[in-house]
Amino acid sequence: MDQQAPKPELKPAPLRTGVAVDMVGVHKWFGEFHVLRDINLRVTRGERIVICGPSGSGKSTMIRCINRLEEHQQGKIVVDGVELTNDLKRIDEVRREVGMVFQHFNLFPHLTVLENLTLAPIWVRKMSKRQAEEVALHYLKRVKIPEQAGKYPGQLSGGQQQRVAIARALCMSPKIMLFDEPTSALDPEMVKEVLDTMVHLADDGMTMLCVTHEMGFARQVANRIVFMDAGQIVEVNAPEPFFANPQHERTKLFLSQILH
Amino acid sequence: MSDMATTTDTRLMAGPPSFVQTRPLDPLPPPMKDSGAIGWVRQNLFSSPLNIALTLVCALLIAWVVPPIIKFMLIDAVWDGASRADCVVQPDRPQVGACWAFVIDRIGFFTYGFYPIDQRWRVDVFFALLAFGVGWMAWLDAPRRDLGVIYFFIVMPVLSVILLLGLPAIRLPSVSTEQWGGVLVTIVVATVGIVASLPLGILLALGRRSEMPAVRMFSIIFIEFVRGVPLITVLFMASVMLPLFVPDAWSPDKLLRALIGVALFSAAYMAEVVRAGLQAIPKGQYEAAMALGLGYWRMMILIVLPQALKITIPNIVNNTIGLFKDTTLVFIVGIFDFLKSIEVGRIDPNWATPVTSTTGYAFAAVFYFIFCYSMSRYARYVEFRVAAGDRR
């Protein structure tokens, strides 16, 4: 690849509004089960939100509603000025601008790492193959695994796979990044390399919503921590007061159980 | 062993040992040879009493069945001759095996049916075009497989139709499909059936999993209805009932009707095979594709189907082999396929001998076996190749 080629435009377009995600009175049911109850959350541009809470509290469901992997039944969700409805065009518009990283990586096993990264830029962003590969290599370098470009996901370690998954989302130059427990499926010694990548991303000013149990990461990176229980947002606070002086009994109990 | 250890321990504790081994022990005997021809035989044929018994039974069965077959097919077989006289028992030839002279004499009929003899070269060219196309598609490392797809799905079908049906404008006299027969018909029906049923089956499988109720209902009704009736019924309906609804002038050709019947029938089976593959793809793959903003068709074509089809290769080939053999049923609606041409050939009085039928059917069996076994072997090769491509 030509080293001197002009750098492709990697900066995402700025958010159209100061509000990245606005959730107003959102409810969701899985059959009879009321999984989200009256969620109100406004995320401003460049904000980094960490969402925590016991399992089954609806954290994942909430962030999956933001790119419509789950459908909400009541209330309003506006992502970068686009309200999510049943209109497929709008959903695709939102998904193009919102990157997501999953607990189980969900890399495409039949494609090489490079093909995983260039697929969406080529087919959705209509980039040329050459340009998409340049962008992909740029982000592979940024997650520190450019030498793995030709391998298949199954040949990488869990930490490497998750870093590829982050790079894959970044290749679409998203305005907002969603992380759904990105380190929960990793061996302990691989958690750090993934968290480091996410910290770098935060330093660059990316708007991030992150479901995680990594409280050290939350303390270091988050602007606000959202604590959820039983489908409700129980408490929202900046990290310092959140850890030092939790307001609700449920939050105190949760923190006492995970911080030893 | 443990006895000795205890003794040693006590001795050690009690003071200096009263006995010290001064000479190394004799070496253990070498392990049983388990590589090479002898090792293979020992491991696979004579490893246990049950295995020995099974080996003996199988050996006896082989000794009982194989020599008579070889004797009939090869040793006593008649290779040249012009009529039945060469294949009947004569005083100087008390044993008569397979009458290959009959097959050799009628091979043109078996291959081309009633296709005009001076035009048979057109069928040969068609076979060559098809073999070239299949080779191009089947050889996974072939150059320019994108051109191969265009050739196989557009160029070759058009050329073949012109070639086989004829186009008087370019001095190719027309040959009606009534005159087609033998291997030609079998190959045409099988190829069209196989090539049409996979895309149709994929569409039906996607339809059955669609969130649009009308599409889903249509797919379910089609699949369940077609699977619920025998192929013979479908063929009868295609050839007998269709003309009742459509005016004569519009009524499609008899062979074409059978082709459509076979293609739709196998599409229903293919759909269920593909659906099984779709269901095996983890939900995360769909979610990752959606989260990247790929629409439904791109998600299916780029992410889901490549993985789903790969795991269903064995079943797809199973269906294909079944379809290849099911093409023999088209003779029921008066189409002259390979098996039917043998059926006609074997009752020809000119070749009426006690061994003619056996020979004809043996020939048919060899023909079908070669095709089906090749498909099976090819599928193994493809499986091996795609498995090497991605180790999970």
Image (cartoon, rainbow, N blue to C red):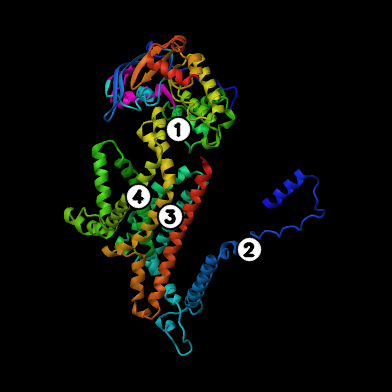
| Residue B176 in view (yes/no) | no
Q: Position of residue B320 (x, y in %)?
A: 39, 54
Is residue B176 rendered to the left or right of residue B22?
left
The chain containing the residue under callout 1 comes to A
Magenta residue span: A75-101
Given this view, does label 4 or label 2 mark the residue nearer the observer? 2
Q: Earlier in the sequence, mark 3 or mark 4?
A: 3
Q: Please tell me whether mark 2 sits on a helix, a strand or a loop.
A: helix
- Residue under label 4: B270
Residue type, numbered disc 2: Ala
Q: Nearer the viewer, residue B6 or B370?
A: B6
Given this view, does label 3 or label 1 mark the residue nearer the observer? 1
- Residue under label 3: B130
Q: Position of residue A3 (x, y in %)?
A: 60, 24
Whether the residues at callouts 3 and 1 have beta carbons within 8 Å, the answer is: no
- Residue under label 2: B37
Same chain letter for marks 1 and 2: no
- Residue under label 1: A106
Q: Residues within 10 Å of mark 1 (few under 14, many from 20)?
A: many
Q: Residues within 10 Å of mark 3 (few under 14, many from 20)?
A: some
The chain containing the residue under callout 4 comes to B
